[in-house]
Structure formats: C-alpha cells, structure tokens
Image (spheres, grey):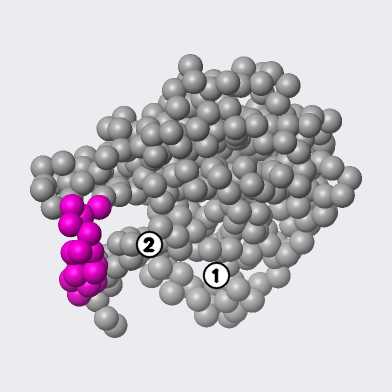
Amino acid sequence: MSKRQFNFCAGPAALPTAVLERAQAELLDWQGRGVSVMEMSHRHPAYMAMVADAETKLRQLMGIPENYKVLFLQGGATAQFALLPLNLLGQKTSADYIDTGIWSTKAIDAMAPYAKAKVVASSQSNNHLQVPTQAQLELNADAAFVHYCPNETIGGLAFDYVPSTGNVPLVADMSSTILSEPIDVSQFGVIYAGAQKNIGPAGLTLVIVREDLLGQARDDTPRPFNYALQAANDSMLNTPPTYSWYLAGLVFDWLLERGGVSAMAQLNQTKAQTLYQAIDSSRLYSNNIAVANRSKMNVTFSLADAALNAQFLSESEAGGLLNLK
C-alpha cells in the first residue's frame, strides 16, 4: 500500500487511520455474521442496536440534553438550507440571517421560495475579514429563527461568540466545527452538519433539534424531510445511509477513546496556533482575518506573490500535502 498522505480536503475530509483500519477489518464480516454492514437491513436488530449506541455516544460527546432529538438524515447541509424554512417557519413570514461568507449566502438564497430572509448583519463591508459583533445584530423579535454559520470553511472566518437571540431559536450550520470543541447545545434551537467534514464520510447529515420546534412543518413538506416524522421514526422513515452512519459511530468511539471534544479542542488550538505563528512570521504567506475571528478548523493563507501559487501547490503535493486549495 502507498504511504498515506496528509489530506487537507475540507470535505470529504481525512478520516482517522484507526477508524479506516477497523472498517477495513469489518468490511466483509461484521460482528461475525458473514455479511458486510453495508448488506444489513437497517431494521435488523443488530444494526438498530448499533445506531442507537452511536446516538448515545454522540449525546455523551456533545452533552445533548434530553429535550433534543438527534436525526441522522441525508442530503448534506445544503439540503438543510431549504429544510429549515420548511420545518421551522410555522406561521411566521421571515427569519433572520447573519451573513459571513459563502455558506451563509447559500443558506440565505435557499430561503427565497418560502419566506423572507432578513440579513440582520453582514461582514461583506470588510470583505469577510471580521464577524459582526453582537451589538451589530439588528434582530427581529418576530423572526422564526436566527441562522448563522459559526465557521466559514472557505473563507476561514469564525465566530468568537455565540449570538444571543432572546426568545428566537438560534440555528447553526456546524458542518466544519461540530465535535471540534465543547459547546452548550441548550443555546441552540437547531444544530445541523454535513458529516463529511468532521463526523465521517459523505452521505450522512446530522440534525439536532429542540423538541418544542417539531411539529410545525409546512403541509407540502415531503415526508422524508419532515423533522417530526423522522424523529418519530428514529431517522428511519426511509432507508438511511447505513454505511455512513456506521462509520460515524466508529468516529464517535475514536473520539471518546482520545478524551472527547475537550481533548480535540486543545489539539486544534495547538495546531492552529502553530500554523498562524508560522504564517504571521513569514514574508511569503499572509492571513488578513481579524485575529479573534481566525478559524481553528481551516487555517487559510495566501502567498504574497500570486505567481508562486502553482509552484507552491505542485511542490506541496509532491511532498505529500494534498488538497491545500
């Protein structure tokens, strides 16, 4: 086998080698059953026990309160951009959005067919180099929810605080930050994340939703996209992405074995700080994002001389550093 490379792809992202090796060992014969987990019925008692255990471990890792449902769905975060208004608008006619970059904008655009997306603050004026402060958020008390992206993967811009939204539910796209540090789940109405950045392979989408927000989906919401129906059916209203769910469970095991999200937060802080120190002390690289809003998950940088970009990427790949762009 070729030597494993350093893969910096944002998503699908690198998986722990130990997880891949365990999946490899179990690929043809899961639990001594003579079949792959990919070939198991999602309603087989053994598979259902496995995914129930995965949810228990996720709840342990994140400290998810009992009054929250955990949904293991499909479609990625992009699908959730549209499913949020379908499930959360109720009788409301608008929702508030904080714009801090590409993924925030995509969520705002997806709202258009359903209701008004009110942009209550934006970092466009500073070229997405600093997030809006709490005082700059022009929130509306009648909004169905407030949406934001704590970490903009492409731009490398991250919030250094959790927005306070009063009685309006806060919704967060945590695709690139989930499980990277401890959070207080009770501060949020909905947390969602495509699995391919921090949880496992592509195909699985995680939605954590407070129970009181269920049951207000629009009548024209397709049944597989109705949060309440999926919650009532343990995320198995339709056939789930069984192998991706299984692999996510292996990642949860791996995280717990290594000290959970607190240990990951310390590791991420150390790695990010080391990189930023190297960037800031170099005349070759630069990062112009406000220090308080620099991402710990995706450290972005540019070369002072753009003419060197192609050479830099080529030599990086030759050295085993893949997908830096």
Q: Amino acid at mark 1?
A: Gln
Frontmost residue, 155 versus 186:
155
Foreground tag (1 vs 2): 2
Dominant secondary-structure state across the stretch colored magenta: helix
Check if residue 165 falls in the magenta segment: no
Residue 159 locus on image (x, y percent) = 42, 32
- The residue identified by callout 1 is 31
In this orientation, does residue 239 appear? yes
Q: Gap between marks 1 and 2, in whole Å?
A: 32 Å
- For this orientation, the residue located farthest to the right is 219
- Whether 167 is drawn above or below 254: the answer is above
Q: Where are the magenta residues, as a range?
A: 302-318
Residue 27 locus on image (x, y percent) = 50, 76
Q: Is residue 43 left or right of residue 66?
A: right
Check if residue 315 falls in the magenta segment: yes
**Quadrant location, the N terminus:** bottom left
In this orientation, does residue 231 appear? no
Quadrant of residue 204 in the image? bottom right
Mark 1 falls on what kind of element?
A: helix
- The residue identified by callout 2 is 9
**Quadrant location, the C terminus:** bottom left
Residue drawn at (10%, 42%) of the image = 281
